[in-house]
Amino acid sequence: MESFFLAETLKYLYLLQDPDTTVDILGKHVFNTEAHPLRLLDQVERRDVCKAQSFPHLSEAPKKDHDFASFEPLGGDRFPEYKEGRSPYNITLLVKNQSDKVARSRREHIKSAMKHAWNGYRTYAFGKDELMPHSKKGRDAWGGMGTTLVDSLDTLWLMGLKEEFAEGRDWVRDHLDHDKVGKVSVFETAIRSLGGLLSAFDLSGDEAFLVQADDLGSRLMVAFDTPSGLPYAQVDLSTGKASDFHWLPNKAILAEFGTLQIEFRYLAKVTGAKEYAKKAERIYDLLHSLQPDNGLLPLYFQHSDANPKKGSGKVSFGAMGDSVYEYFLKVWLQGGKKEEKYREMYDKSIQGLHDELVHTSQPSGLTYIAERSGAKLDHKMDHLVCFLSGTLALGAYTDPQGLNSSRAQRDLQTARALAYTCHQMYARQATGISPEIVKFIGNEDFEATTRDSFYILRPEAVESFFVLNQLTGDPIYREWGWEIFQSIERYCRTDIAYGSLQNVNKPNDRPMDKMESFFLAETLKYLYLLQDPDTYIDVLKKHVFNTEAHPLRLLEKVDRNVNIVSSLDTTPNRNSQKSVKAASRYSYDKFKDGLSPYNITNLIKLRSDKVGRGRRKEVKAAMHHAWNGYKRYAYGMDELKPKSKRGQNNLGGMGTTLVDSLSTLWLMGMKNEFYKARDWVRDRLDHDNIDEVSVFETTIRNMGGLLSAYDLSGDDVFLVKADDLGSRLLNAFDSPSGIPFSEVELKTGKAKNRPQVPKATLLAECGTLQVEFRYLARATGNTSYAEKAERVHKILASMQPESGLIPVNVKNTQEEAEFGKGPIISFGSLGGSAYEYLLKVWLQGGRQESERIYRDMYDKAIQGLHDELLLKSNPSGLTYVAEMQSSVVKKRMDHLVCFLGGTLALGAYTDPRGLHSDRAQRDLRTGKALAYTCYQMYDQTLIGIAPEAVSSDGEDLEHVKGSDFYLPRPEAIESFYILHQLTGDPVYRDWGYNIFQSIQRHCKTSIAYDGLHRVDSMNATSEDRMESFFLAGTLKYLYLLFDPDTKLDILNEYVFNTEAHPLRMFTKLPDRKG
């Protein structure tokens, strides 16, 4: 295939058919004989393509194996043409392209340096504030907030190190806990940690960062609560106490309080919490009123009264003053150049700078910025002042008078001249690295004392080189930056990371044992961006960098992220543990009618998840406490008596607490405890020695516990024991009617009803066996388990009244079952879980049409509930479920009924008509309203603990006489867990945590947990009984409620039996025969 086929033939064919071509063979173009069009000579501008004439300083691109160890600094006094801040060369497009090509190669070496620094930090100090590169360990120099990690996030993102970024994100999400952080600097925390989190959010959109930023910002806000509005210097994040530095009482430092505005304004924008911006901007209002005519502000202000007073007369663009002038300009830019006051404050200060502080050295005429104390000048300049080159250039390019105005040109010239001086501060040292401070005295331009000759990996010079290169396109700044990077590689690199230098003129000294977080956050980032021609970061039109080099989009480029109330308004009282009961964080009245009063955004969910993880740890600690008490005093027995410190076998002697706790231990990751309990089940659980037991209690606690432990762990030990137990319980179904007897003697197989009710069983007892026996049939292949249990439901279906409400007494000793006289209807202790199982059996089977009878029975019962039993209390209108006896409504409700809130919600979300159907919406509202009532049963008592039963015969819900005890039951928390799983509303987590705090205060003993009597008084007394369902249900549901990482899916994968034992749905189980 000839090349001219593509060059000519196809081109001419295309042009022949192209009526829109811009090629003009009469007026603009000639084609050479190979069909290449060229413009006529009078249409072509001359371009200077001679590299030597246009820009003589471009160096070669480094090789992949570039040897930095052999680099020798090139010395000072080079590039004198840049000294006065002029533009000595014509920077052509060709030069820019050549510079870009070289820069892309350099960029990869800087990226490798970042990986080297990050890998050292990750290996030896991950989650710590700083790495000590020689000691190879971390240290917490900034409060213990993983400062280097957080400070590095946006650098990782911009360099495309996405795996490392994800590692950092996971740590921030899972381990960053401001509750554990003590006293921190407001300034350093705002620019490093808050700025790092916000920039990571702005770049990635991952709201895990915004959750943490909002939490941190809300804690820092207390610093602003001073008479003047100028913030305290420090805040204890765990207590909320703010204070000044001990060495500077009643005074605030200019740079510290004047360098918070970019961060807090951005945080206000994305959270909608205007208070963040309001308090930060108030500072600038004060400074505006206090700024002198020359614009130069003193470094200290007294802030102990409403009218702050100027302190020290010292003026500096270095330490303690520098970044406030930077922020005057950048806050104006951040706001879209609309807040003229901030630009005026900047311009006024820069005029004062030129009038009083800009000087030139002898003999070379280097431009530098002096300091002033009163009327006396101090001709010293911090390395920190090198930031000013970039700021002046940015101010010139955005000057309202225009870039070509005399003011803008003055500022740009000063910027370039100062950048040259900063380069000389590096180039004239033996290591090619700048000291911390230089003094311009005598005829040697500048010098650094031994004391001031250290280097802590600072970024300010390369920051300005980046800004100047972005704005002017001059490649010289890339050359200077590359020289600095090579010196850093040569003299600061260690075997695991990078370290500071004690003396920049002692090239043979090894680096110090400290790597500042800003080396990764700023120095390497600016070096990388300086050499990155492809970056989307735009300092003119899109981004502002905070003073820690964290880029944030301009506010007009940012959509408000969430329509929420910020953490500012929901931060819990950190002293709440001192109260009698857990105080509500905000009013919950809007939940009373079962509505959804708030828009639950993804940000709210993420914030709730963060808090949830902390609460999850508390619940796990409670489980450890309860389990350790049981293990020490009652291991292998049915229950622990915590007051007596001994066990009791009141449920047949089958180690009920142990077996009932197995799935909780597994889900909480307490694997050592789980496997030791497994060994007890395998070696010591013997059903041959067990007398009479309740079929219902044994099925839901013991068999349910064994089956769930098997389902979660896959250990057949549990299935063997469950099969043995199930085969013994199966005898109970051999009644004349098929409705099971209520008791079985396990060692003989003899079944009967309880002596108190010799001819009948209870609805809850016979209707709450099916989930377990159906699972056992599926797991073992023994279909008789399922057949006998399902027959019960078929009998109940044939007996179900039109109202759907089934009486609780079911006679079972005759061939045909029937209801007892004076029928009682209850969703509480005698009948409730039977309705729960109608729904769950249908879900367990995969919602098959062949099992639609169960769903139909459930829907019929719930219709009857709404028609006959659903009432509201007076005067508050709390929704509750009454009982009925012989058609007479009894205005009382058991705590057990609180399971129904979750069941109704689960039924609504799985309604065959769809969640948005009238029926499903009705049931969901009722579920939510009932959950609110159940929370009020706790919240309205003096100690925050619910009674066993309440009545609405009086005002609202009062405990029923003789029912002011607490066991402690799981039903309310069970519903909170289900509702939270389905709706995502964090209010259920708040309610659960408030209950948990009350349990901690009033039920916790020295060895475990106890039930209570007299819960509606301040003198509650011990029950001396820790029910097995406290570990099986209450603590499990609390843990799962707070656990955002749980794999349990109650809609598509798991059903919980009524004892809180999760079992996979049949659609998720493999077939198993025998």
Image (tube, grey):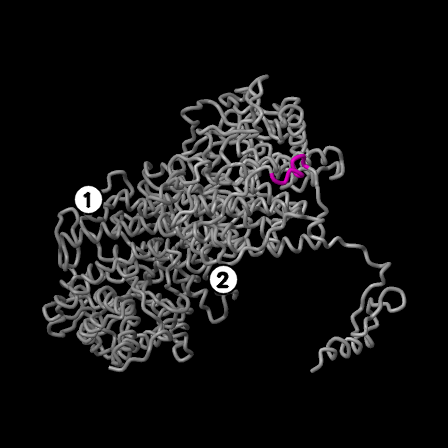
Say which label, 2 or 1, has the lower sequence index.
2
Which numbered tag is attached to residue 273?
Answer: none
Q: Nearer the viewer, mark 2 or mark 1?
A: 1
Q: Residue furthest right?
A: 26
- Where residue 101 appears, as percent x and y from the top left, is 61, 57
Label 1 neighbour load within 10 Å: few <14, some 14-19, many 20+: few
Question: Residue 1063 in magenta?
Answer: no
| Residue topped by disc 2 | 921
Q: Would you place residue 23 above or below residue 1026 in this image?
A: below
Secondary element at image label 1: loop
Q: Residue furthest left?
A: 689
Rounded to the nearest angstrom, the CA distance separating label 2 from label 1 is 46 Å
The magenta region covers: 78-85
Secondary element at image label 2: helix
| Residue topped by disc 1 | 1006
Q: Would you place residue 795 above or below residue 221 in this image?
A: below
Total numbered badges shown on the rendered structure: 2
- Residue kind at label 2, given as amino acid type: Gln
Visible residue check, residue 205: no
- Where residue 449 appears, as percent x and y from the top left, is 47, 28
Question: Residue 82 in magenta?
Answer: yes
